[in-house]
Amino acid sequence: MRDETGAGVPGQAIRVLLAEDQGMVREALAALLGLEGDIQVVAQVSRGDEVVDAVLAHDVQVAVLDIEMPGMTGIEAAAEVKRRCPGTKVVIATTFGRPGYLRRAMELGADAFLVKDAPAAELAEAVRRVLRGERVIDPTLAAAALAEGANPLTGRELDVLAVASDGAVNAEIASRLHLSEGTVRNYLSMAIQKTGARNRAEAIRVAKEKGWM
């Protein structure tokens, strides 16, 4: 239950959802959070596209999301939660501590970003802090994000790389994105240049390693 500001009612446990596709990891997180007297894990899902329905069904106050899940990434799920359930706080807890992921998550409204090798107590405290209206970011990752700078790729260049990562040739990329083949070649050329890659495969690899896509 929440008060009019969306915060928890004093004396009642914080209602948390865990979204993680690895069952053993999800259950371990649930067990650890369950040891906290003021936190209750009320829902668990293994797919990103199940997050919003679970948030709505269980009156979730804080959603703790992994990034790489089937159906929808945790970053995409975070955006949907913020759009459809704006009072719910979102904590990204991931193995992939990439600066690009951090930037994307924060731009889409995530309230916290932690890496999973942090102590469990930090996750519990992050849940409490975001409910108080604070933003919580892993300090090492925040420093790396500042040092690396912004993603140089445009949205369309990322779209082209994403389709190319499925093995599509230029003609198929053009058809799927409603572009001309010449435009696709231009976008690929710019993406290769900006990532310092030698070819499209390397550009895709760099973009994924940086967390840009």
Image (cartoon, grey):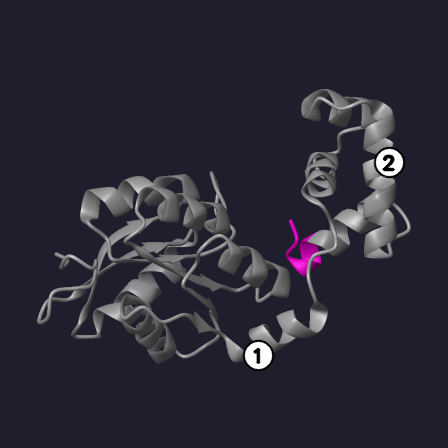
Which one is in front, 207 or 142? 142
Q: What's the CA distance linking mark 1 and mark 2?
A: 36 Å
Q: Residue furthest left?
A: 11
Residue 193 position, x and y percent, is 88, 51
**Residue 65 magenta:** no
**N-term-proximal mark, 1 vs 2:** 1
Q: Is residue 178 above or below residue 61?
A: above
Q: Residue at x 73, y 36 (%)?
A: 160
Disc number for residue 186: 2
Q: Residues within 10 Å of mark 1 (few under 14, many from 20)?
A: few
Residue 44 position, x and y percent, is 29, 51
From the image, which quarter does the N terminus lie in? bottom left
Disc number for residue 130: none
Q: Which residue is mark 1?
A: 140
Is 119 placed left or right of 73 in the picture? left
Q: Residue at x 57, y 67 (%)?
A: 97
Residue 90 position, x and y percent, is 37, 58
Q: Residue at x 83, y 29 (%)?
A: 183
Q: Amino acid at mark 2?
A: Asn
Contact between marks 1 and 2 (CB within 8 A): the answer is no
Q: Residue at x 74, y 50 (%)?
A: 153
- Kind of element beneath mark 1: helix
Q: Which residues are magenta?
A: 208-213
Q: Is residue 15 above or below residue 37?
A: above
- Kind of element beneath mark 2: helix
